[in-house]
Image (cartoon, coloured by chain):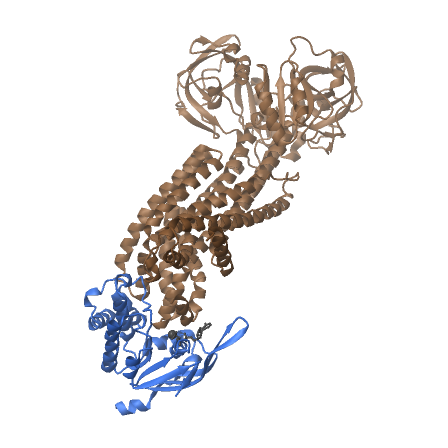
Chain colours: A blue, B brown
Amino acid sequence: MANNDLEQPIVRTHALTKQVNTGDQQLTILQNIDLTIHTGEAVAIIGASGSGKSTLLGLLAGLDLPTSGKVHLDDIDIFALDEDQRAALRGKILGFVFQSFQLLPALTALENVMLPLELMSVPNAEITARRLLDRVGLALRLHHHPKQLSGGEQQRVAIARAFATAPKLLLADEPTGNLDSATGVQIIELMFELNREHGTTLVLVTHDETLSRRCSRQLRMADGKLMQ
Amino acid sequence: MNHYLLSLRMLRRDWRAGELNVLVLALVIAISGLTTVGFFADRVGMALARESNQLLGADLLIMSSKPLPPHFAEEAGKLGLTISSMTKFPSMISNGDGNLLTEIKAVTEGYPLRGNIHVTSQSSTLASAYPEMRLAEGIPTPGTIWVDDKVMTRLDLKTGDMVDIGAIQLKVTEQITREPDHSVGFINMGARALINAQDLAETELIQEGSRVSYQLLVAGEMKAVQQFRELAQARLAKNQKIEGIRDARPEIKAALERAEKFLSLAALVSVVLAAAAIALAVRRFTLRHLDGCAIMRSLGASQKQLLNMYLSYFVLLGLIASSIGCLIGFAAQQILAHWLTDIVETALPWPTWWPAVHGMLVGLVLLVGFALPPVLNLRSVPALRVLRRDVGLPNAHSLWGYFFGLTALSLLFIWKAHDVKLGLYIVTGFICAIAVFGGLGWILIKLLSKLRHQAGGAWRYGLASIHRRAASSILQAVALGLGLMALLVLTLIQDDLIKDWHASLPPDAPNHFLVNVQTDQLQPLEEFFQQYGMSQPPLYPMIRGRLIKINGKNVSPQDYAENVQAERLVRRDFNLSWTDKLARDNTIVQGKWWKEDTQAAEMSIEADIAKTLRIKLGDELTYDIAGHHFSAKITSLRKVDWDSFRVNFFVVVPPGLLEEYPASYITSFYVPPKEGAMMHELVRAFPNILVVDVAMVIGQVQQMIQQVSEAIKFVFIFTMLAGFAVLYAAIAATQDERIYEAAIFRTLGAKREQLSRAWATEFAILGGLSGLFASAGASGLGYVIGKYALHLDYAFNPWIWLTGTSIGLIGVLTAGLLGTRAALSTPPLLTLRKIA
Ligand SMILES: Nc1ncnc2c1ncn2[C@@H]1O[C@H](COP(=O)(O)OP(=O)(O)OP(=O)(O)O)[C@@H](O)[C@H]1O
Ligand SMILES: [Mg+2]
């Protein structure tokens, strides 16, 4: 069954190109990216700063619109959908972890983790959320607001939130970038454990050599292009 | 580093980047509203004063029973005022067959200085009360006399006839239909004639002891007139007195003062709204400047440097925004004035520059008072924020900063209201409202947030957001509540004011008075009215008596030497009447109205007269009525609504006390213009009855009320705009946070609809809360202002709770959802990139 899944690409891009207008000149951030990622893989995207890693990840999640080209998630052409359909798809199959956590300051840790479940109208949201927070070691901080948590703790909440809907695909943009190396290692261990437990496909952007070596595949980016 | 330069650069950058949009918009709308009201009220005030002066024939009169010393005329000349003089006295006019006691006015060139004399060449025997009129050319030339229709009718004259007046004969050349005269009161109104002052000496009518009123008419620029009034007041002898329109006609005075108060109230409300808008808008500004401040602090900027920088930043911003506001205000009132020229007969005078100065000042006070305090917190932003973004966010403590703004605003109010009482009422009202709203809001938000654990996604999130932003949510609700409350109060009062005016002077307000109706004429008069298909109007008995004793102590005119009005009251006869019911336009201010079957010698006196004569409740007055003494005790003081043009008496007693004395009757009623012939018939049938036609005065007052109502409605539009500015500011205040929320929600897979539901919850709570606050406040404040400042019978309106709350809820909800539409459609990555 696992082998079958490997055949099945969960992410497929075709000639993905992103350009932005900065005043008079046009800047090409991504150029003709063709990429396939199979279910269960752990892929690291590495490259120099400004090479377009975050942009690519954002496009894979449909958080931004490309200038041209296509992205297929689970065989669905996401840019053929409208914003709401795209959002629904994200909620169903995808989790995202940001470098700067991006928790909602109005909500407690528990509420932050419950949010994606409630948005999907999943029953027993609170039980799931409590279990996940317990899993990331924050059982005692359920009712604290993000402000009251340290950076590492916030990132663990963010990871719990990303895994709450048991997504097929987890995208993480420098998840350890804002953390000290010891905490960073903990966070990474956590992600790989969850990856194993849930059979989630991982796509990570990172500058960290050790982290990228733990992945089954490395994709190197330079100047908006993919070096195979 | 020169902080002026730095703040200038910062201002330019923020302005270009659109960071100041809300702040500037709030300020510009507020100041343009304020200055529109200011400029316009200024012009309308001047125009109204001038138009009502047409009734007076001048801007100011100096009157005396002795010839006026020349210094008054000289001073007026020095101030560049135009003058004219008039000598008024009663005399017989005869044409051989009959004679008639007539009030003669001998006038000099230039009379009247304000308004016009209207004449007609049509013979009055053509039975039309409203014959074609034309403007008279100047004044009667020496040797001629102009008379009114009473003289024409009674003496059976036509133009060209000669009449005897004193020692000379004059030729009748015109029939007067309308003339400016402030004494258009029902008692003084007899037959009238106008002659040239040059003929006066030859008539030999002015003798020692004759009853003559010498008047100097003065007109000119308002400032000069005011200056003259002050100068003249200081040199006024005992037998002299000054009269402007406000002294002369109580009903116009009352209408004018209320209109003025209302307009300044409307202007004040725009200021409150502006303050609210600015207080809301500055939150976003503060948040956006946090990082900059933290970085500057970490680079070694002192608190003092930051303070100076922001102070000059805001003063500069205030000057620019206020100037724009003043310019718009000026343009808007110009449009308004242009539009209103159709309604106002005369062109509006040019406004003064005060409203602009005022606008600038208010702009600065508002910005510095309401924007600076929270920004002052910025200077204490810890440098640590450079490392940790959640440090140094503005907190509830910054609410204290508004204390300064509130104090400044309060002082401004009291100054601007030109009325310490009104100003204090409003200020206390608002401060109490803020305190109560704030407290209630806090409790409600705490209670609501308890509910969030029971609620699902969208609800939970809306409740959670309100709770987390408790301080600013309360600020938002209070500001919105205050804004809405101000609008509600203004609407209510505006409505009541206009209704009250129209009610006191309906289209069928009495326009004719009959005076001197004898007891044996009551029956024939009733028949006469029946003949014309009219029911007999209520007739009021009138008995003349002179006040001779107060509490048994003799009174004489000398006792009131310092007060011309009081002296005159004591010297002349009072008109007493009896009635068992309190007239509709009278209200008891002290004491009690008598019981229907009272046997006691009671008396009710008009409050102003009582004050003038230093008479108190419980005093016993004794009148000399046809040689008999009549005494009664004052058991009530009444206020009389003089706007109503109905018959009213200063002194009334219960029935049964005065019936034995000789009485005549008086009445007032409405005659449609087309029934003019009837009045002529009445004059013929009852020659002794004095008919007084006040249709013209009523027409003028009605027109004035119409104009003021229009003006008030227009000014209201600006207050509404200021209200929208508050709403806009309230929505924009949390816009940044919402864009961020939207990005995260969408990343987590939320549909638009789910997000808008969360926001709708938040806006609905906010709007409902502010609507509730507004209704509560409006009920209280409206009552207080209506009752104590504008003297209106304020009707408590229970619907206000429903309307207020639903307007708040629907308004904020709609504006909020419309305002956040953009936030919903921004691609999430773009937002998050900006934040990170
Ligand atoms: N909206 C935009 N407007 C202008 N330039 C943009 C925009 N988005 C991305 N860029 C530019 O595109 C390039 C790629 O950006 P991106 O954030 O993807 O780089 P990155 O590889 O993630 O870099 P880092 O490792 O520093 O995070 C950068 O030069 C960035 O400045
Ligand atoms: Mg990046």
**Residue B645 in sight from this viewpoint:** no
- Ligand 1 image-quadrant field: bottom left
Q: Residue B736 placed where, x, y %? A: 41, 61
Q: Quadrant of the C terminus of chain B?
A: bottom left
Residue at horizontal 43%, vertical 40%? Answer: B408
Q: Residue B574 placed where, x, y %? A: 53, 16
> Which residue sits furthest right?
B160
From the viewer's side, name the closer residue of B380 and B342.
B380
From the viewer's side, name the closer residue of B93 and B341.
B341
Q: Residue B44 placed where, x, y %? A: 59, 38
Q: Is residue B478 left or right of residue B419?
A: left
Q: Is residue B161 left or right of residue B664?
A: right
Residue at horizontal 42%, vertical 47%? Answer: B370
Q: Does residue B579 lie above or below B792 as drawn?
A: above
From the viewer's side, name the closer residue of A52 and B46.
A52
Q: Is residue A1 left or right of residue B729?
A: left
How many numbered circles does the render carry? 0
Q: Does residue B31 lie above or below B646 as drawn?
A: below
**Residue B218 in sight from this viewpoint:** yes
Q: Residue B684 placed where, x, y %? A: 67, 23
From the viewer's side, name the closer residue of B476 and B377.
B377
Name the image quarter holding residue B53: top right
